């Protein structure tokens, strides 16, 4: 055998190259038995890192792209993954990375088509992608497969051969967690409402998965599942949001509201203005507006999906795949953190969003 590669060790140990890489670099979770097996092979086969490949990477330009919604108007959520990308680029500054951004309006399907048409596939080695429009996203992923361009997804999962890794939360499980939280102390007969504010929730697999997870929890409690409603606002403006909330909350005695995305602060504002402090409210993410309502106990719980970390780990794993052929985890799950006003300072000090 010539120079021993990570791939060779992986084949002999019957594990993935990503597992071997995690053992060699002492990162990530690997079972003790697998770790010992891989380390034994590293010693027996006299594996040495390919310093030449690393040196070559330092001397050539690495051409990557990121395709994601822009952070404009009230879509401040998308500034968080942007910050994560900037952190990753800062840590990889010794390499010559050209990261070309392709930002699109997540409410404009036609604009997304135009955005991906501007990608020069011939000079792109890898793409970090936050999918929104399902059909058009599949078109992009199919084109990447044809061009043999690896893709790492974050925020929302889409199955396709070009996808080498997904970084994010298990959306179904986060919906289950939200349901369990809101169920604590819920009075008998109280109604619950799921509020979807996305332009079309079928554009976002993670939104539909969160709702499925939430409903799944209450399926085991038929006496409560009959009191569960869904309000699809389809990107409505604030005035229509208030009208719709008036229609449903004004006619029924609700005990809780679950907002499936980061715009939970809009519902918090409504509940505050209408003196509905008795309604428990759960939503997502440490946006400044959400933090304000959480600190004032107008939002009871925030589930952090760590959008900054998603983009950060997504870009670094894409870089390692393209440059060093390190196979990433197929699904890099991030924890489902439950944030209250009591533990908020900890998350603010640890976050790089």
Image (tube, rainbow, N blue to C red):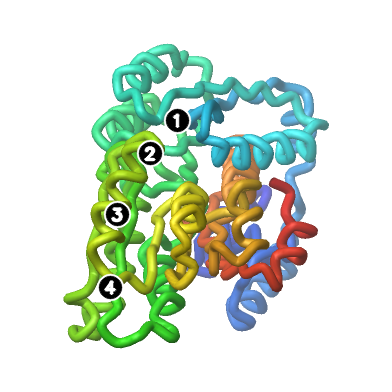
The image quadrant of residue 81 is top right
Q: Which disc is residue 149 wearing?
A: 1
Q: Which callout, 3 or 1, points at the residue further toward the start of the chain?
A: 1
Please state the horizontal and vertical placement of residue 220, each as a whole percent of the image. 24, 84
Q: Which callout, 2 or 3, points at the residue further toward the start of the chain?
A: 2
Residue nearest the viewer, comparing 286 with 149: 286
Residue found 60% across the figure and 82% down from its top:
33
Residue nearest the viewer, comparing 308 with 36: 308
Q: CA distance from mark 3 to mark 1?
A: 28 Å
Q: Which disc is residue 191 wearing?
A: 4
What residue did someone put label 2 on?
162
Residue nearest the viewer, comparing 302 with 249: 249
What residue did someone put label 3 on?
208
Q: Secondary structure at mark 3?
A: helix
Q: CA distance from mark 2 to mark 1?
A: 7 Å
Q: CA distance from mark 4 to mark 1?
A: 48 Å
Answer yes or no: do the residues labelled 4 and 1 have beta carbons within 8 Å? no
């Amino acid at each position: 055998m010539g120079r021993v590669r990570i791939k060779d060790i992986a084949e002999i140990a019957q594990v993935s190259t990503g597992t071997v890489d995690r053992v060699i670099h002492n990162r990530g979770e690997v079972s003790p038995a697998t770790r010992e097996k891989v380390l034994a092979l590293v010693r027996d086969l006299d594996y040495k890192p390919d310093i030449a490949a690393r040196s070559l990477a330092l001397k050539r330009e690495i051409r990557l792209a990121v395709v994601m919604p822009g952070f404009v108007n009230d879509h401040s959520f998308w500034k968080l993954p942007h910050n994560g990308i900037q952190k990753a680029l800062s840590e990889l500054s010794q390499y010559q990375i050209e990261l070309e951004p392709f930002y699109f309006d997540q409410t404009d399907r036609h604009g997304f088509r135009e955005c991906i048409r501007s990608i020069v596939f011939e000079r792109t080695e890898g793409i970090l992608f936050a999918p929104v429009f399902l059909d058009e996203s599949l078109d992009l992923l199919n084109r990447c497969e044809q061009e043999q361009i690896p893709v790492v997804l974050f925020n929302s999962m889409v199955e396709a051969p070009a996808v080498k890794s997904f970084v994010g939360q298990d959306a179904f499980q986060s919906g289950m967690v939200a349901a369990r939280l809101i169920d604590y102390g819920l009075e008998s007969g109280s109604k619950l409402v799921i509020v979807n504010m996305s332009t079309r929730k079928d554009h976002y697999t993670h939104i539909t998965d969160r709702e499925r997870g939430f409903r799944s929890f209450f399926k085991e409690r038929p006496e409560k599942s009959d009191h569960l409603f869904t309000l699809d606002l389809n990107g409505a403006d604030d005035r229509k949001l208030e009208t719709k909330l008036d229609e449903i909350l004004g006619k029924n005695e609700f005990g809780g509201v679950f907002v499936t995305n980061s715009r939970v602060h809009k519902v918090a504002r409504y509940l505050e203005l209408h003196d509905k402090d008795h309604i428990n409210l759960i939503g997502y993410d440490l946006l400044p507006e959400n933090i304000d309502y959480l600190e004032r106990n107008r939002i009871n719980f925030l589930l952090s999906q760590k959008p900054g970390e998603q983009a950060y780990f997504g870009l670094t794993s894409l870089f390692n795949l393209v440059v060093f052929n390190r196979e990433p985890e197929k699904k890099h799950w991030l924890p489902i953190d439950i944030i209250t006003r009591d533990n908020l300072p900890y998350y603010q000090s640890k976050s790089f969003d």
